[in-house]
Amino acid sequence: MSANLRIIAGEWRGRKLAAPAGDTTRPTADRTRETLFSMLVSRLGTFEDLKVADLFAGSGALGLEALSRGAAHCLFVDQDAAAIRAMRGNIAALRAQPRCDVRASSVLSLGPAKEPLDLVMLDPPYDTGAGAVAVDKLARLGWIGETTWVSLETGKGEPVSIKGFETETERDVGKARLHLLRRVS
């Protein structure tokens, strides 16, 4: 478990984040987050005013990184109590509450969306297939639209195949594989 979680860039660059207590949550390593955000920046250009989601959020590091880089709002979802405590503490420490919606529930319990998000980031437990199931359901509920970017972190050997989506790119970092997905018409 990384005790050195930090915001990589933007308004809160260098600020430390607390990781959830226990071993239920596996925080995305700084190096993996750095690679992911480099992949996203090369496609999005900027995070300014984006509406994003950090699903299976854990410490909230992915969503807070997006907010630090200018995203307007982030939906954080996790069902682990220790993760929710750490995430709420990180959000409070950065005074980011007005730009955050924290939901202590399963990603699969989200109802229909009012409008699609710009970016959906998922970091589910490895080798469970939970990410693919969540992406499929979120697309059907309107959270993922035609222009939404989806980032899904899996274990290196975990295959990803989601009906209606194509892998735009993927990259291996340590034990993780980062997938950037887009809807296909």
Image: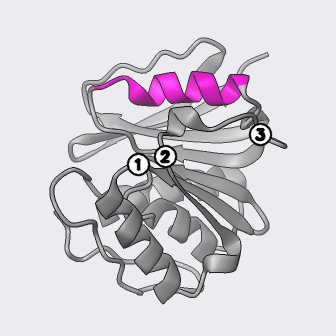
Q: Which residues are magenta?
A: 128-140
**From the viewer's perspective, is residue 41 above or below residue 128?**
below
Let me know if residue 137 is in the magenta part. yes
Q: Earlier in the sequence, mark 3 or mark 1?
A: 1
Q: In percent of the image, x 37 and y 69: which residue is there?
A: 85
Residue at label 1? 79
Left or right of residue 40: residue 112: right
Q: Secondary structure at mark 1?
A: loop
Q: Can the viewer see residue 7 in this picture?
A: no
- Which mark identifies residue 105? 2
The quadrant the C terminus occupies is: top right
- Residue 178 location (% of width, % of height): 41, 40
Which numbered mark, 3 or 2, is in the foreground of this view? Answer: 2
Residue 144 can be seen in this image: yes
Q: Which mark is residue 113?
A: 3
The kind of residue tagged 2 is Ser
Q: Is residue 19 above or below residue 180?
A: below
